[in-house]
């Protein structure tokens, strides 16, 4: 395994005055001590910033070693529920990084961007097709940003009709934290509704909360409980009849790709996490892309810019251009300085073209097959699905409540011990309503053997929990660090390195870096 | 289906384990009338060879013109090591570092980033990134309102010298919460205290100061910061990180320093790439740390007392606090922070200062060359960094279009956002422009202006 087992020094601890990656610096006459011509002294920096002074090799070695302290899709099975950690094809990165794409300035004339804009236009069209929506805007930069765009559009829609009282957003208690947080960022009040024991939302409770103040509802379907909301048509009718709109959180779109479309279910607006369903990388925390799709009535409110096409005449062919405030005067506006995470969008475009019609259809099928197989095997091995009797979508929940009650070993303990077995942990303690929750999403790109290996590890950990629970409760044992002191991290804030705090990491047999 | 490993034999065995007769049975909880049978609008699959040809053709179609625009996105030299390391699968294909023990690489890197960016800005604490420099101004405004409890107005002053794209993104971000971003006109191309006097006796929560400002001009940040503080306003600085290689950090502006400093990491090793992905940064003083949006990494120890890193102060965030979180942000721009951290490590204090000085020198040379072209005038005779406004003797758009035909991206047309400036063009030259490039631009502009006169 590629895991680096030794801790790595902080980069500043390699720093020596006078060292540097000289080959990267401009060979300029100016020395930094010489004031730049024409800049008054009171506007200049007096002290050097704390940046490392290290050679290029030191930089390469340091960050390579840091990378080796990570689990990733490329190195490990990563069944993190709700996150869709599927293979990120190398071609998507390779071709998005062609110099022509990388070098293009966002404000360069459209005449020098027709190749790029063509990709963006076609991406919009493909996303419309797979979601059943009437318009797509690409600029939101992550799922939560797409949610923000969606709820802002819902508000703009009601406002444009003079329906000013509608400021309540309904969210199920199982919703992702970004849903209520987004509603509040959009100036709305959150009304929470419960989930029933079978994983569907409580439709009677929904009937009770809708009314003249309802702006809309935010739903994930399949839900974060890993099941398909069976009464979705009824839900749509209740909300629409009350004058509200339906928002689709597309985090789980992978489950239903090519099988059923949010637009057909009655949703008015959706975001897609292109970094989940369309396999752009998660990058250790981003960037993502949260393209939004809208129904007919929300078209005028889409965030700008959107790519438009003018059918060409003669040999000039089609021309693509940005649609801005001038074209969409009712738009909720600009959400990013330029046009969102363009490079991520190119990666999603390449992925969709490589899947094609047939492949798109198979994504949901294999993701669902893998999840149901894994759930069946774990159930047989003595683990409890949270919603027995339900089909898994592309993910499912195992509750470790029994193991916690009987053996004292929690979902967290299973998660940490899995790391020792070479598997990234599932999502833990989300959604919150399921006790000792492990939300498991294998994705379609994992082989049967990988899934079987995970089941074997879970069985082995269960045996350990029965025979030596303390060992499981103090896992992991084979990572560079053991369980970290989160309380200390929050109480004794150490958020930046300072020369005085250097621990120096004197080589000991344990942390010595092998030469 | 290009990336699936399941063989027909696997599928059969897996279905048997599940107890289903065919894959389609797994979808039997979805109402029948909602199911679709095909996605007619999606084209046939391309294999890697064919998509490679298509993308190469599309990229080539856009060419590699000579660029003279900045306006919030800057062309810089990017060391090979930056993206060779950043695209390593262990960084590229990892998730947000929730499982700390399996994510020490990303966590330590963010800690190193927080150290570098706070030192550049002269602040105490940084988050792990926001979406971009535009949304960072919006988040800073919301944060200022939380931090400045004595101010009740939710009014933030935003001079017109702040990047208009940032202003628009900020307005969209805060508008639904009743926060008012008020434009302060700056007719002289920089913000002066005279422009602010009328707010002296009003309850205003914060003032945004961009340095260098959108026109490339250097604001008198010490005086402005002291004025804002004297009038009970917080100061939000929006700054270019390259410039901080030589310019005074916001933490040292005036007597007390700015309260929040934000901006975009794009100039630090991130390609222009049609506008993204970039990474917003947000730094502040320790007293405001609990009001910050986004993720923060802290150093701590493990069960054996060994140093390790973890996400901290998570009670500010949506996954814990839900509707009471400081922001809805979840996924941020982590991979670009990786690139920026590697870039700053390669540059060090001297390399970054040299880049900043070279940009400044090239822009001065560009202005000298353009000033010699008939029909061109340099506006705002004030100290500047690496951008400037020039005024033409005729409408800008056709000139830019003509330069584009010559393979030159000639600048950003200011006439939509600043009609009061007339036929104004914002130009930029960074360290990547050579003297020959600059001369080529000046010659092309001269030719364009001459030809246009003939045509008129
Ligand atoms: C169900 C759900 N909704 C929303 C989000 C937010 O998406 P992002 O992290 O891209 O902002 C996530 C991802 O974490 C999610 O799982």
Image: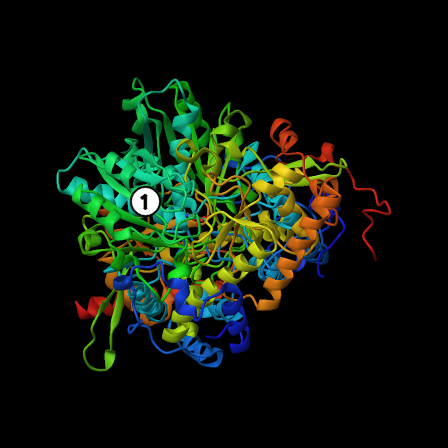
Using the image, determine if residue B145 lies above or below residue B296. Answer: above
Instruction: Please tell me which residue lies in front, B188 or A92.
Output: A92
In this orientation, which residue lies closer to the viewer: A30 or A14?
A: A14
* Left or right side of A473 for A383: left
Q: Confirm or reject: label 1 Cβ below 8 Å from ligand 1.
A: no
Viewer-proximal residue among A296 and A471? A471
- Between A374 and A141, the one lying in front of the other is A374
Check the image and name the residue furthest to the left. Answer: A162
Residue A507 appears in the rendering: yes
Picture coordinates of residue B317 (x, y %)?
47, 36
Who's the residue at 20% across and 35% down the image?
A211
Give percent across and percent down for residue A322: 27, 60
Q: Secondary structure at mark 1?
A: strand
Residue furthest to the right in view is: A509
* Chain ID, mark 1: A
- At 56% from the left and 54% from the top, the residue drawn is A379
Q: For the residue carrying disc 1, how many other residues have a C-alpha within 10 Å: few (<14), some (14-19), or many (20+)?
A: many
Specify whether B19 is left or right of B420. right
- Give the position of the N terminus of chain A as an image quadrant: bottom right
Q: How many marks?
A: 1
**How far across and down, in percent of the image, does residue A146 sit?**
35, 49
- Image quadrant in which you'd find residue B110: top right
Rendered image coloring scheme: rainbow
Q: Is residue B399 visible?
A: no
Image quadrant holding the C terminus of chain A, namely bottom right
User: What percent of the width, then of the height, locates residue A310?
Assistant: 21, 69
Give the residue displayed 30% in from the left and 68% down from the top: A111
Q: Is residue A44 left or right of residue A207?
A: right
**Above or below — where is A326 with respect to A174?**
below
Residue of label 1:
A218
Residue B257 drawn above or below residue B261: above
């Amino acid at each position: 395994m590629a895991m680096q087992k030794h801790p790595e020094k902080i980069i500043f601890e390699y720093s020596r005055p006078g060292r540097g990656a000289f080959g990267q610096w401009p060979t300029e006459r100016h020395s930094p001590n010489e004031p730049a011509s024409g800049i008054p002294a009171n506007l200049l920096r007096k002290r050097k910033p704390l940046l490392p002074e290290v050679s290029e090799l030191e930089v390469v070695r340091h960050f390579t070693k840091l990378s080796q302290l990570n689990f990733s899709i490329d190195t490990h099975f990563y069944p993190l529920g709700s996150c869709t950690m599927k293979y990120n094809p190398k071609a998507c990165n390779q071709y998005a990084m062609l110099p022509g794409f990388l070098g293009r300035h966002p404000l360069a004339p459209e005449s020098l961007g027709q190749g790029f804009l063509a990709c963006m236009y076609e991406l919009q069209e493909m996303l419309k097709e797979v979601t059943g929506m009437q318009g797509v805007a690409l600029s939101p930069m992550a799922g939560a940003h797409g949610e923000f765009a969606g709820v802002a559009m819902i508000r703009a829609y009601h406002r444009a009709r003079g329906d000013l009282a509608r400021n309540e957003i309904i969210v199920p208690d199982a919703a992702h934290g970004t849903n209520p947080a987004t509603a509040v960022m959009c100036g709305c009040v959150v009304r929470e509704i419960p989930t029933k024991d079978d994983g569907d939302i409580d439709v009677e409770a929904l009937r009770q909360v809708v009314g003249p103040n309802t702006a809309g509802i935010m739903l994930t379907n399949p839900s974060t409980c890993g099941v398909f909301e069976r009464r979705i048509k009824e839900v749509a009718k209740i909300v629409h009849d009350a004058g509200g709109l339906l928002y689709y959180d597309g985090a789980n779109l992978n489950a239903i790709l090519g099988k059923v479309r949010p637009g057909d279910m009655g949703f008015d607006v959706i975001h897609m996490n292109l970094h989940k369903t369309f396999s752009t990388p998660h990058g250790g925390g981003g960037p993502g892309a949260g393209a939004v799709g809208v129904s007919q009535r929300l078209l005028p409110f889409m965030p700008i810019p959107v790519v438009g096409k003018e059918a060409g005449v003669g040999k000039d062919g089609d021309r693509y251009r940005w649609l801005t405030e001038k074209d969409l005067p009712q738009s909720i506006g600009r959400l990013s300085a330029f046009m969102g995470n363009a490079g991520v969008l190119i990666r999603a475009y390449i992925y969709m073209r490589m899947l094609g019609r047939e492949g798109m259809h198979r994504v949901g099928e294999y993701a669902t097959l893998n999840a149901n197989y894994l759930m069946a095997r774990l159930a047989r091995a003595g683990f409890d699905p949270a919603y027995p009797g339900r089909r898994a979508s592309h993910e499912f929940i195992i509750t470790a409540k029994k193991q916690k009650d009987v053996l004292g070993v929690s979902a967290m303990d299973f998660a940490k011990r899995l790391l020792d077995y070479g598997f990234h942990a599932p999502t833990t303690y989300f959604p919150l309503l399921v006790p000792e929750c492990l939300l498991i999403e294998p994705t379609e790109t994992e082989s049967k053997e990988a899934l079987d290996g995970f089941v074997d590890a879970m069985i082995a950990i269960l045996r350990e929990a029965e025979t030596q629970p303390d060992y499981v409760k103090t896992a992991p044992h084979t990572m560079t660090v053991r369980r970290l002191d989160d309380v200390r991290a929050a109480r004794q804030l150490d958020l930046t390195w300072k020369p005085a705090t250097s621990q120096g990491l004197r080589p000991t047999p344990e942390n010595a870096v092998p030469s | 289906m290009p990336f699936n490993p399941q063989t027909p034999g696997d599928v059969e065995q897996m279905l048997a384990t599940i107890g289903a007769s065919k894959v389609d049975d797994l979808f039997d909880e979805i109402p029948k009338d909602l199911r679709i049978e095909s996605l007619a609008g999606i084209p046939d699959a391309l294999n890697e060879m064919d998509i490679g040809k298509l993308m190469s053709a599309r990229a080539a179609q856009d060419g590699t013109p000579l660029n003279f625009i900045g306006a919030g996105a800057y062309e810089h030299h990017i060391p090979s090591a930056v993206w060779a390391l950043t695209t390593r699968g262990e960084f590229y294909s990892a998730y947000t570092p929730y499982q700390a023990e399996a994510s020490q690489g990303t966590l330590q890197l963010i800690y190193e980033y927080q150290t570098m960016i706070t030192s550049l800005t002269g602040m105490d604490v940084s988050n792990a990134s926001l979406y971009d420099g535009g949304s960072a101004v919006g988040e800073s405004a919301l944060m200022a309102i939380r931090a400045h409890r004595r101010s009740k107005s939710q009014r933030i002053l935003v001079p017109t010298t702040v990047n208009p794209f940032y202003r628009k993104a900020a307005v969209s971000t805060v508008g639904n919460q009743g926060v008012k971003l008020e434009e302060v006109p700056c007719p002289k191309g920089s913000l002066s205290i005279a422009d602010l006097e009328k707010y002296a006796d009003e309850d205003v929560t914060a003032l945004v100061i961009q340095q260098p400002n959108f026109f490339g001009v250097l604001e008198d940040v010490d005086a402005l910061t002291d004025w804002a503080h004297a009038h009970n306003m917080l100061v939000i600085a929006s700054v270019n990180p390259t410039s901080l290689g030589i310019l005074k950090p916001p933490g040292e502006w005036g007597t007390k320093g700015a309260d929040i400093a934000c901006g975009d990491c794009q100039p630090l090793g991130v390609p222009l790439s049609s506008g993204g992905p970039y990474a917003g940064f947000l730094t502040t003083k320790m007293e405001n740390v609990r009001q910050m949006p986004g993720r923060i990494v802290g150093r701590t120890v493990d069960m054996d007392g060994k140093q390790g890193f973890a996400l901290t102060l998570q009670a500010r965030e949506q996954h814990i606090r839900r509707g009471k979180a400081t922001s809805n942000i979840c996924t941020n721009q982590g991979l670009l922070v990786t690139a920026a951290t590697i870039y700053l490590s390669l540059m060090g204090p001297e390399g970054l200062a040299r880049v900043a000085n070279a940009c400044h020198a090239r822009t001065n040379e560009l202005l000298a060359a353009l000033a010699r072209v008939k029909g061109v005038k340099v506006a705002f005779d004030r100290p500047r960094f690496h951008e400037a406004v020039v005024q033409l003797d005729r409408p800008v758009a056709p000139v830019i279009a003509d330069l584009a035909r010559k393979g030159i991206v000639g600048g950003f047309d200011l006439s939509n956002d600043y009609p009061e400036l007339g036929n104004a063009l914002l130009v930029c030259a960074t360290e990547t422009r050579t003297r020959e490039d600059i001369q080529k631009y000046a010659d092309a502009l001269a030719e364009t202006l001459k030809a246009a006169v003939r045509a008129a």
